[in-house]
Image (cartoon, rainbow, N blue to C red):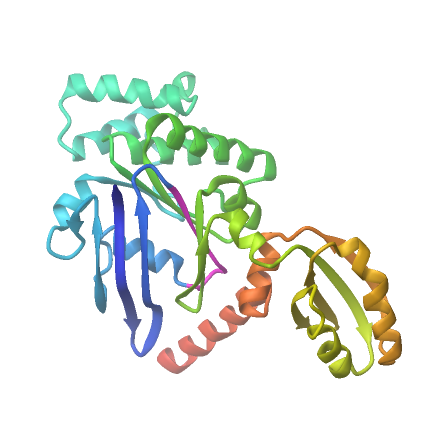
Amino acid sequence: MTAIEVKNLTKNFDGFTAVDNITFKIKKGELFGLLGPNGAGKTTTINMLSTLLTPSSGHAKIAGYDIIKERDDVRRNIGIVFQEPALDNKLTGKENLEFHAMMYGMNKKEREKRIAEILELVELSDKANILVENYSGGMKRRLEIARGLVHKPKILFLDEPTLGLDAQTRRHIWNYIKKLNREGGITIILTTHYMEEADYLCDRIAIIDHGKIIAIDSPNKLKDSLGGDIITFEIEGDDEEFVKSINKLRFVKSVKKHDSKLTVAVKQGERRIPELINIAQKKRVDIISVSLHKPSLEDVFLHFTGNTIREKEISQRGRNMEFARRRFGR
């Protein structure tokens, strides 16, 4: 059964296309990730699907309801955890949940029962009556997830759920998300630019760049699509003839150049390194270093986009500054 259906969804801002004609489906109970750099269009996509933004074109259904024609029905069926903190620090954890539950029309008995359940789920029962201003970053994030779930939504949106958290706290949040999905059967769509997060959590991933979905599949299938092992050569010299030669080899699946490095996807990488080095020597290409590893999502992203996520984020910041300069004269 389909929980989310998106077709040709597009969002333009003053001539800038933030989300560009994307199409995908998410099954009920699936944990689905939008993976890409900051500025790729992930949050804009979430904001359209949660009815906070109106699409420029295209359409989508959430739990069977149209995001434009049936906004109220969509909102009753979703929970959302925003990228930026949205808690009231001057209220206790329980009071934050109570206020949210009241907004959804839950009666007092129902609120009390549900709040107790959800605080126990995120392991904050003993912190329920403490002011949120005294919570740690991880506790605040868990409370925000609890708030998104208090009205029992069918679908939960998590926008960069572990942004700014330390590695240990991030891992704890991952375990809560897994538990929600596995035990609660809730459909979750999350955005992230952390490769490890997407790999650990998601049943399927859509890689998004410049507002377009460029690949979509399970993490393992995306990595398998590269065709085996990844050999990375750091090189000096003109590599054009070297690249042409190794591209013709039957065991070479792909070759990507990135600065002074070549990443070569091959089968049985350990056996192929001497042969590739021999070809480099014949083509007068100096090998400075060589490494071998199994494909990662970073390799997948580099394969499809030609850059790492970090490089894409630096590039996007430059584009954002230029857009602001043209629009506001700064």
- Quarter of the figure that contains the N terminus: top left
Residue 96 shows in the view: yes
Residue 249 found in image quarter: bottom right
- Quarter of the figure that contains the C terminus: bottom left
| Point 62% across, 52% down: residue | 296
**Range drawn in magenta:** 31-40
Identify which residue, 105 or 287, lies in the foreground. Answer: 287
Q: Is residue 233 left or right of residue 27?
A: right
- 179, above or below 326, in the image: above
Residue furthest left in the image: 69
- 139, above or below 13, in the image: above
| Point 70% across, 63% down: residue | 251
x, y percent for residue 110 = 18, 20
Identify which residue, 155 or 132, lies in the foreground. Answer: 155
> How many marks can you see?
0
x, y percent for residue 67 = 18, 54
Q: Is residue 164 left or right of residue 284?
A: left
x, y percent for residue 61 = 20, 52
Residue 305 found in image quarter: bottom right
| Point 34% across, 42% down: residue | 86
* Residue 144 within the magenta-colored segment of the rendering: no
| Point 33% across, 64% down: residue | 22
Q: Is residue 194 left or right of residue 54?
A: right
Q: Is residue 89 left or right of residue 134?
A: left
Identify which residue, 21 or 320, lies in the foreground. Answer: 21
x, y percent for residue 5 = 26, 52
Identify which residue, 285 or 78, lies in the foreground. Answer: 285
